[in-house]
Image (tube, helix red, strand yellow):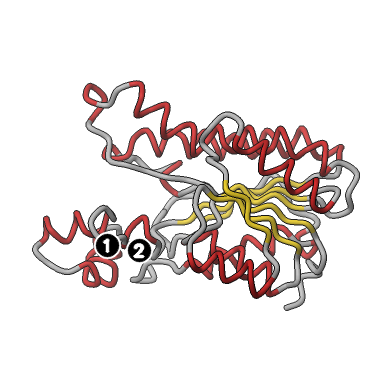
Amino acid sequence: MDLNLKDKVVVVTGASKGIGLAITRELAAQSARVVAGSRTTTPELAELSESAGVAVVNADLAAADGPRRLVEAAVELHGGIDVLVNNVGASEPADGITGTGDDAWQRIFDVNLFSVVRATRAAVPAMTGREGAAIVNISSVNGRQPAPMIMHYSAAKAALTNLGRSLAEELAPSGIRVNTVSPGPVRTPLWTNEGDGFANVLAEQAGTTVEDVMDRLLPESMAVSLGRVGEPQEVADLTLFLASQRAAGITGADYRIDGGLVKTA
């Protein structure tokens, strides 16, 4: 489907791997002018820069000035911004409410919530008045599901989902739509990285392989109705739809893409 994103200026945060890389790749396939923000440049992102003209800006998006630097680079390159995809995120195990200190909470909130606040604050002036302007925030089903092992991540994502609704109200008069995408478990390096991926921890605990965790154990234990974890491309497809004028009447929405994990409204 042609989403009419050709030549649209799109900023993507956390673009080097996983969902962010899939979004960046699909935007490039739609001939958008993509500015990809990431702390490091992976070989996959470098290839997109070489083959599709994706502009890569290395910035620590959890730092106070990182999002602003990314947005300023996009404006300098292209004169404005049509779409902002706030994808960057990270998680780590919490050690319960008594064992998880302020530094850990601040670290998780900086990358999952304040990066969005800062990027949006910087981008809105460059988006106002541009036809079809849109912001898509990548949140998580953990924003509505109890998850004590990642309580700080879940709290940050809950705040992000709420922020999206508030921004949708504030920015509608400026012609900027704001929507949220909330994935369930997705086959990304967060889960599959050798050594520190969550699936490695679960595999060691269960005495099985990472592949078995991702293909069987994880969807079974989470009661995912479709019986499988999601794929980055599926999240990318939904994100691009919401970023496009095909979704011109949609704002303030939170779309779960979780294979039926969440059973309530």
Q: Which of 200 and 72 is in front in this view?
A: 72
Amino acid type of the residue tagged 1 in the rendering: Leu
Residue drawn 61% across the image and 47% down it:
86
Callout 2 secondary element: loop
Q: Earlier in the sequence, mark 1 or mark 2?
A: 1
Q: Calculate the distance from the C-alpha at mark 1 to the C-alpha at mark 2.
A: 8 Å
Above or below 123: residue 190: below
Image quadrant holding the N terminus, namely bottom right
Residue bearing the label numbered 1 = 218
In terms of image quadrants, where is residue 54?
A: bottom right
Callout 1 secondary element: helix
Amino acid type of the residue tagged 2 in the rendering: Val
Q: Position of residue 144 (x, y in %)?
A: 44, 42
On screen, residue 149 versus residue 117, left or right, reads left
Q: Position of residue 186 (x, y in %)?
A: 41, 62
Residue bearing the label numbered 2 = 224
Q: Which of 234 and 262 is in front in this view?
A: 234
Q: Do the residues labelled 1 and 2 touch (CB within 8 Å)?
A: yes
